[in-house]
């Protein structure tokens, strides 16, 4: 470990402040001693202070120098070191570099374990995060709009619904449109290997897409791969019954995980969470043809979330029949490919799951649902207008009539589109091309 890290023994308050800063993101940060310890290991005190000063939006070094009062040379060195460790994101635009503090998820949590590293105590960090797993669920899933969505196996989509399938719902199209693709270790399986037992599924299998892939490659968190290898990884995932989880956006997704229920937090959360109705499904759902089903149980064994069970029947003759629990079915299609009797199909859900168009739409919807919109709109802590605006908007959105109105789908959609257009007209509207 670097000598610059004192692990928060002398000035722990700065790590509490950093925890609050990270909690301002739509996917927040748990308020636990374990999480503060993680922050104290990853960030030096100077880095934590800098992180607390950074706006939620992308910022260049000259503007950050005005906010912090530090020299541009010092800031550039600090930010480059932090980018190399996965603590900040960096984007080049017309020869100028912009930075943003990484959120927890998707963000620096995954980058901790995307590769084997000797600059941080990975086993210790994995244990802290594993112990805090239940505290993470409320900050990750407390809202209708989620950061991820399930992509169905293309082979499981019947010919009768192929015309309904959008390009952003096809794994092959998502990979082709990404341009750049990378592959790295699965964060969840690496974590489990470090603190518990090794998952039997492949470790190097998580894909970065587009801008996300480019950043991971640049900072050595992942390796660049060609489209053919990415499609091979998808085919291998199908053989193993893994679930594709990607960015919950129509345009410019930045990741595609291939998840298993034995290690991956996103899938185990479906079985462990009871207080939140998480919606991370595809737009399709598995349906049983009872006339063809023989009750063999293959579909139940491969279902990653236990949505299929076998039931005893007496008519037309005694035996077993598979049944789908539609409340937890992901619509991934693993069961369809496992069935040898053609008795399972993916069908379009009655109520279509709305996928946000861009990351801006997704983040704004999540912030609105979680009472954090003021954090997204008033991002500069150095400006008194932003500090006052944040307080006023927070109070305004807490009013019962406003809260109720903003969470109505039609009102929420119109309001988010209004904010998007305003942002596009601003001097930094180019940022929307990246989010």
Image: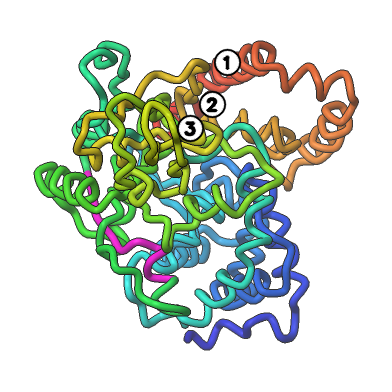
Circle 1 crowding by C-alpha within 10 Å: few under 14, some 14–19, many from 20: some
Q: Which residue is mark 2?
A: 361
Q: Which residue is mark 1?
A: 417
> Does the residue at mark 2 contact the one at mark 3 (Cβ under 8 Å)?
yes
Please tell me which residue is depicted at 49% across the width and 57% down the height of the picture: 265
The stretch drawn in magenta includes residue 186: yes
> In which image quadrant can residue 434 be found?
top left
User: Is 290 on the left-hand or right-hand side of 58?
Assistant: left
Mark 2 or mark 1: which comes first in sequence?
Answer: 2
How many angstroms separate mark 2 from mark 3 (CA)? 5 Å
Q: Which residue is mark 3?
A: 359
Quarter of the C terminus within the rendering: top left
Instruction: Using the image, determine if residue 76 lies above or below residue 289.
Output: below
User: Quick one: 421 or 329, which is closer to the camera?
Assistant: 329
How many angstroms separate mark 2 from mark 1 (CA)? 8 Å
Residue 210 appears in the rendering:
yes
Please tell me which residue is depicted at 39% across the width and 76% down the height of the picture: 193
> Does the residue at mark 2 contact the one at mark 1 (Cβ under 8 Å)?
yes
User: Is 305 on the left-hand or right-hand side of 9?
Assistant: left
Please tell me which residue is depicted at 33% across the width and 75% down the height of the picture: 116
* Magenta range: 181-191
Instruction: Using the image, determine if residue 380 lies above or below residue 119.
Output: above
């Amino acid at each position: 470990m670097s000598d610059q890290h004192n692990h928060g023994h002398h000035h722990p308050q700065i790590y509490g402040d950093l925890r609050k800063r990270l909690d301002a993101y739509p996917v927040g940060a748990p308020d636990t001693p374990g999480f503060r310890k993680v922050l104290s290991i990853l960030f030096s005190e100077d880095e934590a202070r800098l992180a607390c000063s950074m706006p939620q939006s992308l910022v260049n070094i000259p503007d950050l120098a005005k906010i912090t009062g530090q020299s541009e040379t010092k800031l550039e060195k600090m930010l480059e070191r932090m980018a190399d460790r996965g603590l900040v994101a960096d984007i080049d635009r017309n020869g100028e570099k912009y930075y943003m503090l990484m959120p927890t998820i998707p963000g620096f949590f995954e980058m901790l374990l995307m590769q084997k590293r000797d600059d941080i105590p990975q086993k210790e960090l994995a244990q802290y995060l594993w112990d805090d797993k239940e505290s993470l669920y409320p900050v990750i899933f407390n809202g209708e709009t989620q950061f991820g969505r399930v992509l169905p196996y293309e082979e499981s989509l019947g010919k009768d619904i192929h015309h309904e399938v959008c390009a952003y719902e096809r794994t092959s199209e998502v990979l082709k449109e990404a341009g750049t693709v990378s592959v790295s270790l699965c964060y969840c399986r690496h974590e489990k290997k470090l603190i518990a037992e090794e998952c039997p599924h492949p470790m190097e299998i998580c894909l970065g897409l587009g801008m996300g892939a480019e950043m991971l490659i640049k900072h050595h968190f992942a390796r660049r791969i060609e489209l053919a290898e990415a499609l091979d990884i998808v085919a291998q995932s199908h053989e193993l019954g893994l679930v594709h989880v990607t960015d919950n956006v129509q345009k410019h997704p930045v990741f595609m995980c291939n998840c298993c229920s034995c290690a991956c937090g996103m899938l185990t959360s479906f079985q462990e969470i009871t207080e939140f109705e998480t919606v991370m499904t595809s737009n399709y759902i598995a349906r049983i043809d009872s006339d063809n089903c023989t009750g063999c149980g293959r579909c139940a064994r491969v279902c990653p979330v236990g949505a299929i069970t076998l039931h005893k029947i007496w008519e037309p003759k005694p035996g077993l029949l598979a049944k789908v629990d539609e409340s937890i079915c992901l619509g991934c299609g693993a069961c369809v490919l496992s069935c040898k009797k053609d008795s399972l199909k993916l069908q379009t859900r009655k109520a279509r799951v709305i996928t946000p168009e861009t990351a801006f739409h997704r983040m704004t919807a999540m912030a609105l649902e979680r009472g954090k919109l003021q954090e997204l709109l008033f991002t500069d802590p150095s400006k008194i207008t932003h500090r006052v605006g944040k307080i006023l908007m927070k109070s305004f959105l807490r009013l019962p009539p406003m809260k109720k109105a903003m969470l109505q789908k039609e009102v929420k959609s119109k309001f988010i589109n209004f904010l998007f257009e305003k942002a596009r007209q601003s001097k930094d509207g180019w940022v929307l091309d990246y989010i």
